[in-house]
Every structure is written in structure tokens, then in C-alpha cells.
Amino acid sequence: MHLLNNMRAALACILLLGTAVVSAAAPKTMFLFKDVLQSNTTALTTSGFNTLLIFRIGLTDAGDLVYYSTGDAGEAVDAPVVSDGVYTGGSALSDKIRSFKTLPATLVDRVEVSLVSHDTTFQIIRDLVASEGTGPESTLYRNFAALRSAWSLDALNNDDEGVYDLASTVAFAQMLGGLGLKYTIAPYTNRAFWADALSRINTDSNSQLLDHVYLQVYDGGAGNDPASWKSALGGMKIAPVEWVVNDAKPYEGTSPDAARAEFAEWFAGGPSRGRGTGTTTTSRRWARRTPSTGTC
Ligand SMILES: *[C@@H]1O[C@H](CO)[C@@H](O)[C@H](O)[C@H]1NC(C)=O
């Protein structure tokens, strides 16, 4: 389809998520695997996606934050961004990220960053929650407050694929909620964990804290049925995430047209199958530290 082909051409070096169904409320989300300082900002902000999801922030053992991404030639880009409660990532990076929502022609109104479990991130969060808690003096609170402020973030995305520690997941999400952030998840398996986490994260006092579910429907999640996830998650709308081939990694993933057909098929199931509005496609570039067969 026109839009997706354009997207593939323009945004070849990133992971894309986009909805096939246009709705004011629906997230149309794109994962940014490529270093945002090397991406085409015009394309990112004007192609029709309203949410950008920066892949990815990791934690050092001390709880400092590092931006791990991939450069134009596939090279590792490791940028320390927060240390001991202070933003250290430089203004070039923070200005770039803030510009996603402020450029005159931008369509983007939400920026998220992801945390991924093939780093030791969720183990470190678990251990820091246990040792320091999540109060205003804690390392986690101070460091994520600094990142939120420097990058003008709207949400953190949890892509835990292995640690699944319920207590620290809930405490961390609620800490982020206290910082004014939203929380999103990108599951591929372990529905019981995510249903439990969702029911504890969204409370009466912050019932929309966890507000988007990006369901992986590729690789390890290829068998996922969005409708059954929707019912397992209490009726939460589900945005399926496709991994779309691109010129940097043409041998893996689905084509934009095939992804589109898949969305159409899900959508044809209609509300009786419990489909959400957030049908989503992704495209990704080769990404360092991501298993070649793996989920992101
Ligand atoms: C960046 O994207 C815009 C919009 O798609 C396009 O017109 C422009 O040619 C791109 N620039 C580069 C250097 O690729």
C-alpha cells in the first residue's frame, strides 16, 4: 500500500509500527531502532505515525541510564544519558528527541522509550526496587525523572521477555505514573503475567497508567491471536506489532503488503472477535544485540 511503501523507503533503518485503522484515539506507533541522531527526522514526524517509540534505554548496575541504538552502518551507538539523577546525554540528543513533538509539521504527539530484557535491565530494576524502593530519593526515581524531563517523554515501554518479576514491575510502573508518565507493554508470551501486572498497575487512582498493549505477532509471538489476548487482558485494546522487511534487513520479516493483508483479516473478524482499533505494522532494521530469530 502506498503509505507503507513510502514508509519503507523513507524509514528503512527503523522499526515501524503503524495502524491500518485510522482513528483519532488509536496509537500509530513506530519503533525507532536507528540512532535518532542519524534518522530522517522529517520522515519520522510527517509520515502519519503519531507515536514514536525509541529503542532502547538500558540500566547499568548502578542504575545509570544508557541509550543503546544502532547507527547508519549497523554500528553500536551507546550513549550514556543519565547518571546519578543528572541528564548527561547532551543537548544535541535531547533537542532532537524534543523536536519530534514540536516541529511545525509534526504529526507526533507522544514519545516513548523501551526497556528490553535481553539487557539486564529488568534484573537491575528488580534489584534496585528491592534495595532502595521507588521513592523520590531512589536511584530509579531520580534517574527516570531526569530522562523524562530532558527528553520530554510521555511513556515507558516494557519489553520484558524473561524476568517477569511482578512486584518490581508493578512498583516501577507506579513510580513512572507518579512522574506523570504512561506505561506500555510489548508482550509476545506469558499472558498470565501480563494480565496480573495490568490488573495491579492500573488502579482506581490511575486507571489508565498502562494504556497501550503492543502485541508481538512475529517470531516467538507469531501464533498470537490479538482477540484472545484482548479477552485475557480484560478487554484492553491490542495493537498487533508486525516486523516488516526493509532494505537493511530484507531477508526477515513480512512485506508491507502482507502485513496489511494480515491486518485486514484480523479487522474483518470485527468486534465480535474482540479486535482493538490499534492494528499495527512494524519494520525493522538489523539491530545489534537482537537475536536474529528473536523478538525485539
Ligand atoms: C527525508 O524524508 C523526507 C520525507 O519523506 C524526504 O523528502 C527526504 O528526501 C528525506 N531526506 C533524506 C536525506 O533522505
Image (spheres, rainbow, N blue to C red):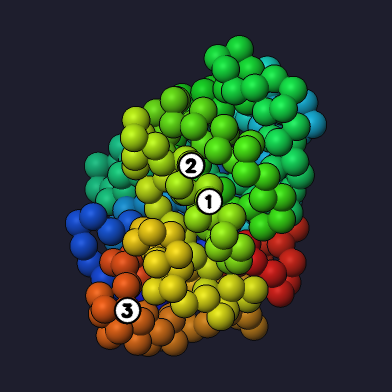
255 relative position to 63: left or right? left
Question: Measuring 49% from the left and 83% from the top, which residue is drawn there?
Answer: 255
Q: Which residue corresponds to mark 1?
A: 196
Residue 200: give its label. 2
Task: Categorize mark 3 by other alpha carbons within 10 Å: few (<14), some (14-19), many (20+).
Answer: some
* Res 274 visible: yes
Residue 13 image offset from top left, x and y in percent: 55, 63
Q: Residue 273 shows which numbered tag? A: 3
Depth check, front residue: 19 or 100: 19
Q: Quadrant of residue 276?
A: bottom left
Residue 19 x/y as whole percent: 34, 67
Mark in the foreground, 1 or 3: 1
Q: Secondary structure at mark 1?
A: helix
Separation of residues labelled 2 and 3 (CA atoms): 26 Å
The CA distance from mark 1 to mark 2 is: 6 Å
Report, in whole angstroms, how far the alpha carbon at label 1 lies from the one at label 3: 22 Å
